[in-house]
Amino acid sequence: MQHYTNINDLDSLKKTVEEAVELKKNELQFKNLGKDKTICLLFFNNSLRTRLSTQKAAQNLGLNAIVMNFGSEGWELEFDDGVVMNKNKSEHVKEAAKVIAQYSDIVAIRAFASLTDKEKDKAEIVIENFKKYSGIPVLNMESATGHPLQALADAITMEENKVSHKPKVVLSWAPHPKALPHAVANSFIEMMQLQDADFIITHPEGYELDSEITKNSKIEYNQKKAFENADFVYVKNWSSFKEYGEVMKSDSDWMITADKMKLTNNGKFMHCLPVRRNVVVADEVIDSENSIVIQQANNRTYSAQIVLKKILENL
Ligand code: CP
């Protein structure tokens, strides 16, 4: 594997999940694979899990990790060609990507959607320009349209909690006061489209995601109906895609409560975190024994590590 910017960059999701589960049993078994190699982790946006788990994964493979809060500490980058750079942007991505590539063997990038320019967000200008100009493998730590390391961690977590029948998995929208990106939901959908599962997306009307991502996935506008007999309930807020970046509904009737979880088949509650308690999910649900959010966060290390292992083996 050269780059990992989408879950579909994996040759096989099933095999990768199995390899990650094995890796987790002895996380230092490949501790010399990245010896004398360096990864630069560039954060254009905040993070807890992604930053710490990706750095830990790199260290577990013997990689030297350099972490930079690019959004607050780097020069503001220009991505358009032919621009007279006489405003606030001090450096062009053409130079920045080539310079960073001299210091590292892999570059990992977190750069969220603007939620103001749909076309630029869809074009993935940060990830794609780093791919184009750095000449080294690029790892997506959440981009404008996807969070494939999270989706792989989610797949590992579902494998560890698998049921004996074809599972019913629900992706449910939940309220949030701020406009959030579509990346986590998009990658979860793309990952579920690779699984043998009864998969349903539920959200209020007007919150339809990009149809190029959802494709033929089932959509149910009645949240309670969607929850019936679910084995896994994956919860995430996202802003409107049609009215790009708008928050059209924030009242609590879509919050995940114990009463709603009672409709499920003793279903597991999943969320990528961070989560706003008693806005997105009631305390009684996230604190219940069916909540597997901490296990999901733990598996971020192994999703990053198995992906970095594959990239290192291809260097
Ligand atoms: N789930 C996730 O990506 O968490 P952070 O934003 O804290 O990295």
Image (spheres, rainbow, N blue to C red):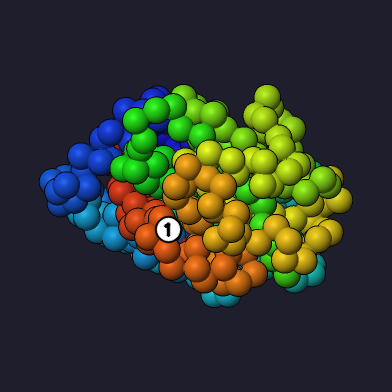
Query: Left or right: where does residue 239 sit relative to residue 314?
Result: right
> Quadrant where the C terminus lies?
top left
Q: Residue at x 72, y 66 (%)?
A: 252
Instruction: State whether residue 139 appears in this view.
Output: no
Say if 47 sits above or below 94 in the image. below
Q: In which image quadrant can residue 236 be found?
A: bottom right
Where does residue 38 sit, x and y in percent of width and height? 31, 54
Asked which secondary structure carries label 1, the reply is: loop
Question: In the image as oriented, which residue stretches furthest toward the bottom?
Answer: 73
Q: Nearer the viewer, residue 57 or 76?
A: 57
- Which sits in the foreground, 58 or 99? 58
Q: How many marks?
A: 1
- Residue 70 in the image: state x and y as whole percent: 54, 67
The residue sitting at 35% across, 56% down in the picture is: 295
Amino acid marked by disc 1: Ser
Residue 27's spot in the image, x, y percent?
Answer: 19, 51
Instruction: Give the vertical position of 238 relative to 17 (above or below).
Output: below
Report the residue at 28% width, 33% height from top: 18
Q: Is residue 311 left or right of residue 171?
A: left
Res 92 quadrant in image:
bottom right
List the residue tagged with mark 1: 291
Work out which quarter of the rendered image holds the N terminus and state it: top left
Determine whether the beta carbon of the residue marked 1 sits less than 8 angstroms from the nearest atom of ligand 1.
no
Image height of 11 relative to 285, above or below: above
Location of residue 288 in the rendering, given as x and y in whole percent from the top left corner:
42, 63
Q: Is residue 2 visible?
A: yes
Q: Is residue 281 left or right of residue 35?
A: right
